[in-house]
Image: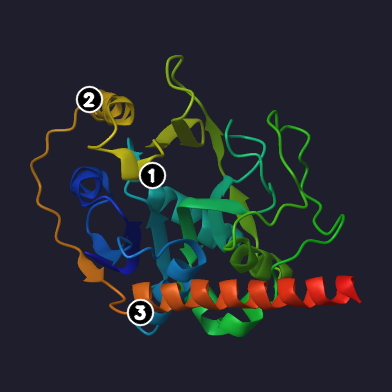
Amino acid sequence: MNSKIALISTIINKELYKKSSQLFPLNIRKYVIDGTNGMHGLDSIFYMMHKLQGKGIDWLIMADEDVLFENPDMVFDIIQKMESQNFTVCGVRDGGLILHRKENPYVINTFFSIINFREIELIWDKKEVLKNNYTIDNEFDDDLRSLKGAFDVKSIYEPYYCFYLWLRRNKKQFLFLDTYHPFVDDEITNAVYFEDKVLLYHTWYARSYGINKKHTNRINKILELLKFENKIIPNPIVFKHKTFFIIKSIRKLYKRLLMRIQMKRNNKNNSV
C-alpha cells in the first residue's frame, strides 16, 4: 500500500462508481465525496481540502465516476514525472481539445487531475482562492497554437477555475495531457493520453448511467472494450456533508432575495 498517494471521487451515480472504481489504480487510499446532495465543483474542492488536510497525503488523484482507466498504473509514471520536473497540477485543458468543452484552456477540467497535495496543503487559503475568479489579458504564455478546437481565454465559466488560477498565479507549474475523441460513433467520450498511450477514457454523463439508454449503452461499450468483469466490491472511505443541501438552498434563497432587492432599486431609480 502506497500510503502517500490517494484517489478521491465526487460521485452522483453510485452504480457507475461501483464499476469504474474497480479499474482505479491499486494499492492506494480511496476516498469518496457523496455528491448526491448537490455537492460538486468548487464546493467539492473546498470540502476535499477540509477533509484531507493533515492525513499525510503527498499526491492526490481526482477522478470522477465516469472515468474508466485503461492503464491505471500509468498514474505512478505521471507522478514520477511531476515530482522530478516540479509540476504541481496535471490534467486536460478545459478548452481547445474536447469538442463540447470550449472554455478556458489555461485551466483544467476536474474530471481527472493529479495534484501535489503536500505542496498545495502548505499554502492553502480558501479566501485567497475565492479572490481569483477573474482573467487578465495575456497573463499566461502557454503556446495554444496546436489546439484544434474552440476555446475562450477569458472564460470563467466554471466556479472552480479560481482554484487553478490561484495556483497558476502562485507560480505552480501545470502538466497538460493530450486528449482525443477515439470513437467514430461516439463524439462524447474522450481518451486521455500520456506519452502516446491511453491512460483513461472519460465518458461524461455519469448522472445518466442506468437511466438514459443512449448513454448507458455508450458507457457499457467502453466497459466491454476494457474487458470489465465486475468482481471487486469497492470499499472507499466516504465523506458526506450532511447539511450541504440546506446550506445550498439557503444560498440560492439569499441570491434570489438580493436580485429582487436590486430589481426594486433599479425600477425605483428608473421611475424617478
- The residue that mark 1 highlights is 74
Q: Quadrant of residue 197?
A: top left
Specify the quadrant that holds the N terminus: bottom left
Q: Secondary structure at mark 3?
A: helix
Give the image location of residue 78, x and y in percent: 47, 50
Q: Residue 168: x and y, percent?
A: 69, 65
The answer to whether residue 226 is above or below residue 8 is above
- As measured in the structure, the alpha-carbon distance from the residue carrying label 1 to the one carrying label 3 is 26 Å
Judging by the rendered image, the residue that carries numbered circle 3 is 51
Which residue extends farthest front? 271
- Amino acid type assigned to the residue bearing label 2 in the image: Glu
Question: In the image, what residue occupies the spot 88% across and 70% down?
Answer: 270
Dot 1 or dot 3: first in sequence order is 3
Query: Residue 255, how many percent across, how many down?
Result: 58, 74
Count the marks.
3
Is 93 left, or right, of 106 in this rendering? left
Question: Farthest right residue?
Answer: 272
Residue for badge 2: 224
Callout 2 environment at 10 Å: few (<14), some (14 to 19), or many (20+)? few
Query: Between marks 3 and 2, how big is the CA–CA gap?
Result: 35 Å
At label 1, the amino acid type is Met
1 or 2: tag closer to the N-terminus: 1
| Disc 1, SS | helix
Residue nearer the viewer, 10 or 166: 10
Pointer 1 and pointer 2: residues touching (CB < 8 Å)? no
Instruction: Using the numbered discs, state the Cα–Cα distance from disc 1 to disc 2 in whole angstroms.
Output: 21 Å
- Which of these two is toward me, 222 or 256? 256
Instruction: Please indicate, yes or no, whether residue 72 appears anywhere in the rendered image.
Output: no
The residue closer to the viewer here, 264 or 231, is 264
Q: Residue at x 27, y 25 (%)?
A: 217
